[in-house]
Structures are given as C-alpha cells and as structure tokens.
C-alpha cells in the first residue's frame, strides 16, 4: 500500500513541478519496479517441481472388522506435475483437468530442489509447459493481435522503413487516415489502481487456500489426539475416583479388560475417524472425480451396514461424525474423559463448516468481474500507448513482443488468483485421508490402559523398535 501511494505521489508531482521529465522518469521507474515485483511473485507461485508428489503411501488397516473385502487402492492419490501417460487427454495438460496434478506435498528432497540455485533455469526451461500460461493463451492472443494491428496500420498510414533502411511514404492517404496512438501517461496514472486490485485479488485467494489447508491441519492434529486419548484411557472408568461418589453417584470400579473387545472398540474409533475425513474429502470434491473411488474405499474398509448407512446419507460427513460419536460412547471410560474426546468432534464440525463456507462463497463476483474488465481493457488499449515508446526499433516492431510479455505477466497474476480461489481441488486431501487412516490404526494398536505397567512398556518399546 505504501509503495502504491509513493507511485501516486510521483504522478501528482509530475503535473505540478517544473522538472516534468525527471519526475516522469522516476514515475516510470517506480512503475517498472512494481511490475517487476508482481512478475517475480507470479514466477515464484507458478514454479512447481514436476517430481513433487502428494502422500502416496496407502496404509494397511487393522483387521478389526468382520468384513473380508480387500481394500481398494486409491486412484486419487496423484503425483505432482503433468501426466506422463502419452494416452492422457489433452485437457489434463491445463485448465480444470490439470488441477489434480497440483496437489503438492513437499518432503526434504523437494525442499532441496526448491532451494536449488538452478531453479531459475529449470523454471524458464518449462516456460512453455506452464498450465497458467496456457490458460491465458486466448487473452494474450487478443492483446497481441491488437498490437499487430496498431503496428501494421501505423506503417500503412504513417510510412515505413524497409529492411535496407529506406523510408517510404504512407501507402494509405486521406483526410481520415492517421497514425493511431494514446498517451502513455493515461496508463501510468491508473497503473497503481490496477496493481492494488490485482494484489488484493491474489492475497484474498491465497488466504482462502491457506485457510482450507489449516482446516485440514486441524483435522490431522485432532484425529491423532482423539485416538491417542481413546487408546491411553481405554478401560479407565473409575480412576481416580474408584468407588467414590461423584455428582451424587458412585463411580464404577475398574473392570478387567478383554483384549479382543478392546481391539474391536478402539478399531471402530479409528475406522470412524477415517470415515469422517474421507467423507469430508468426498463432500468437497467434484462428484465425477471421486464418487466411484469413495464408494469402493468405504465398502472395502467398513462393514456393509456401516458403509451403506454413510453412503446413503444426505450429508455423509455428518453421518460419519455421528457414527464416531457412537463409537466413543461405547468405550469403557469415565464420562469426563469421554467429554474430552468429544471436544475433538466439535472441532471436526467446525472445520467441516468452514470448508463448506469456502466452497459455497467465492470472492464477491462484482469485485472479480471489475478486476477482470479493468485488466482486459487496460491491456487491450496498451499497444496504442506503447507504439511511440519503441520508436528506436525497426518500425516500432518491438512493441509487439513487449505487449505479449506484459499481457502474459498480468493475465497470469489474475489467473493465479482464480486458480487459488477454490482450494480443495488443488489440496492433496486424498493423501491426508490415507495418512490419517494409517496413523489412527497405528495408534490404537499400541498397548495402553488395561495392561500392567511393565508389560505395556515392553510392548510399546517393541512396537517402536522398527522406527528407531
């Protein structure tokens, strides 16, 4: 904001101070700096290592349900980058089809490549493979066509210079045949306003993506928290009030724990935790991409009754969350500890509601439309103002590539904002679900309440030994 105010101040000084040429040059330099910063930010956001991948390890669930169906591999855990299959449709290279290849999750190897000093060369080498640039191809073609028209018309109406350097008279002559052009000052005056619109548009869209990612971060954290507490507190119905009165009723004595029952009940908590996040992922994804995989995964992990109840529900995440509440209620545990477990479910409801808000409420359409109209008009008329600025080149021809470059840069920034505005189809939600399922299954398999202290310690050490 401060930088843009500086630019506006330069524009005001230009019209009041006697040294108009100096102030104008400073103004142009400030404008160039702003455009350079915008293009640099665009390059950073558009850069994507083709080898980055989403979570792709499918967890092995615990054998805790009577179903004997084999778990179906997930087809929506996708790698980052364009498809390598030569038979892949062209629509997967850019546009809506390419969004599923932008679900980036970094590991240490990807961060090393991200910081590589060769990143600029690598990004420039893939310039013509960019889905962002392909998406704005029609707009760039339109502005470049206007630039070619201005160049050709002004040669016909104002004269031209051949390759030998000989100047020729205009081929078209008449009272109404004149060279076309606009003053550059008109464009430099409104450039700060356009920059503010694009900056706000991009920042708002990134904020939506960041908020969606944080919602899934809360899901990841609290699913682990829920299963950790359920495992550690299982069977502890009375401690620390065994046999004492609480709220007018005696608390029950701790009972011996049946290992098979413990495995089943905790397994149900783990399964229903996974069922909720998987249903939430399906709820936020396009039906044609995920419905088939969702049904197959639910039927492979849950019993037929459980799977059908969730799949047939009008609001599947709510039904899965209800089943998780029932699974928690069946745990032999003091009610105060059940209350702590249920606090996680309230957080799940908040993340679900917040995600539904982002999915159903875009940035106000009148703002997006005004920004797009302003940008399109500015770029379509820009060649008329650039013509006179390239008088040192042959017949002003360098105006044409300059127009194309500016159009790619500014249309690309607007395209980035549009792609970020709906974040769920570029988030690796399937990878999150797979990892949540695997982590929860691992947590409930650990020894906890119901075993003697020494036995539990030995068992836990044995479970952790392969990872050390």
Image (cartoon, rainbow, N blue to C red):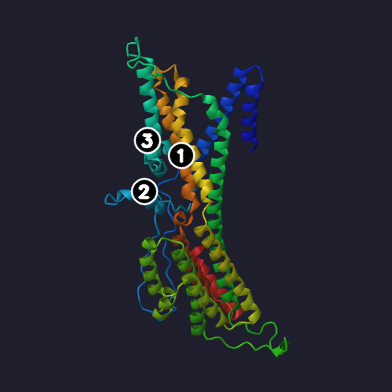
Q: Image quadrant of residue 308?
A: bottom left
Q: Mark 3 points at which residue?
A: 141
Mark closest to the chain's N terminus, 3 or 1? 3
Which of labels 2 and 1 is toward the front? 1
| CB contact under 8 Å: marks 2 and 1 | no
**Label 2 neighbour load within 10 Å: few <14, some 14-19, many 20+:** many
Image-quadrant location for residue 145: top left
Q: Is 268 situated above or below 45?
A: below
Question: What is the spatial separation of the Cα atoms under label 3 and label 2, in whole angstroms?
Answer: 24 Å
Work out whether residue 307 or residue 121 is closer to the camera in this orientation and state it: 307
The x, y position of residue 327, in whole percent, is 52, 79
Q: Which residue is drawn at 57% across and 81% down?
A: 329
Instruction: Compare residues 162 and 307 and report the one nearer the observer.
Output: 162
Q: Nearer the viewer, residue 277 or 257?
A: 277
Residue that lies at the very extreme toward the top in this rendered image: 166
Q: Which of marks 3 and 2 is in front?
A: 3
Identify the residue at horizontal 49%, vertical 78% (top origin). 268
Outermost residue toward the left? 87
Residue 178 position, x and y percent, is 41, 19
Q: Which residue is drawn at 38% across and 74% down?
A: 299
Residue 305 visible, this orientation: yes
Q: Which residue is drawn at 38% across and 64% down?
A: 74
Q: Distance between the residues labelled 2 and 1?
A: 22 Å
Q: In x, y percent, where is residue 112?
A: 49, 45
Please give the residue where the numbered disc 2 appears in the rendered image.
82
Give yes or no for contact between labels 3 and 1 (Cβ–Cβ under 8 Å): no
The 10 Å Cα crowd at callout 1, few under 14, some 14 to 19, many 20 or more, is: many
The residue to which callout 1 is attached is: 411
Query: Disc 3 to disc 1, how far (Cα)?
Result: 11 Å
């Amino acid at each position: 904001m401060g930088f843009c105010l500086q630019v506006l101040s330069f524009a005001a000084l230009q019209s009041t101070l006697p040294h108009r040429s100096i102030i104008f040059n400073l103004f142009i330099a400030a404008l160039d700096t702003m455009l350079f910063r915008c293009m640099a930010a665009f390059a950073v956001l558009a850069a994507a290592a083709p080898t980055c991948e989403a979570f792709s390890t499918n967890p092995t669930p615990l054998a805790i349900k009577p179903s004997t169906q084999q778990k179906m591999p997930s087809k929506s855990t996708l790698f980052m980058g364009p498809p390598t299959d030569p038979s892949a449709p062209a629509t997967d290279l850019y546009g809506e089809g390419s969004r599923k290849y932008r679900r980036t999750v970094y590991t240490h190897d990807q961060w090393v490549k991200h910081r590589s000093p060769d990143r600029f060369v690598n990004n420039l080498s893939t310039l013509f493979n960019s889905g962002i640039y392909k998406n704005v191809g029609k707009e760039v073609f339109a502005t470049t066509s206007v630039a070619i028209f201005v160049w050709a018309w002004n040669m016909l109406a104002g004269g031209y210079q051949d390759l030998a350097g000989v100047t020729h008279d205009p081929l078209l002559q008449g009272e109404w045949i004149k060279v076309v052009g606009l003053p550059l000052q008109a464009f430099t005056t409104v450039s700060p306003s356009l920059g503010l619109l694009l900056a706000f548009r991009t920042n708002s869209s990134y904020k939506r993506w960041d908020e969606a990612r944080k919602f899934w971060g809360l899901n990841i954290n609290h699913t682990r928290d829920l299963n950790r507490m359920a495992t550690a507190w299982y069977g502890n119905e009375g401690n620390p009030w065994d046999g004492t009165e609480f709220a007018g009723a005696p608390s029950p004595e701790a009972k011996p724990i049946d290992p098979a029952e413990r495995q089943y009940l905790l397994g149900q908590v783990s399964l229903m935790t996974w069922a909720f996040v998987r249903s939430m992922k399906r709820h936020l994804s396009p039906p044609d991409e995920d419905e088939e995989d969702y049904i197959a995964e639910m039927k492979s992990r849950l019993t037929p009754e459980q799977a059908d109840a969730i799949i047939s529900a009008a609001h599947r995440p709510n039904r899965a969350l209800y089943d998780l509440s029932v699974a928690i209620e069946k745990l032999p545990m003091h009610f105060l500890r059940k209350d702590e477990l249920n606090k996680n479910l309230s957080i799940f409801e908040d993340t679900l509601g917040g995600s539904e808000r982002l999915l159903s409420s875009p940035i106000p359409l009148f703002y997006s439309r005004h920004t797009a109209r302003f940008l399109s008009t500015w770029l379509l008329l820009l060649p008329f103002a650039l013509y006179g600025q390239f008088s040192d080149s042959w017949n002003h021809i360098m105006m044409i590539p300059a127009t194309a470059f500016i159009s790619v840069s500014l249309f690309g920034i607007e395209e980035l904002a549009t792609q970020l505005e709906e974040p769920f189809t570029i988030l690796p939600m399937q990878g999150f679900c797979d990892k949540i399922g695997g982590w929860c299954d691992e947590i409930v398999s650990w020894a906890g309440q119901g075993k003697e202290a020494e036995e539990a310690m030995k068992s836990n050490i044995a479970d952790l030994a392969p990872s050390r």
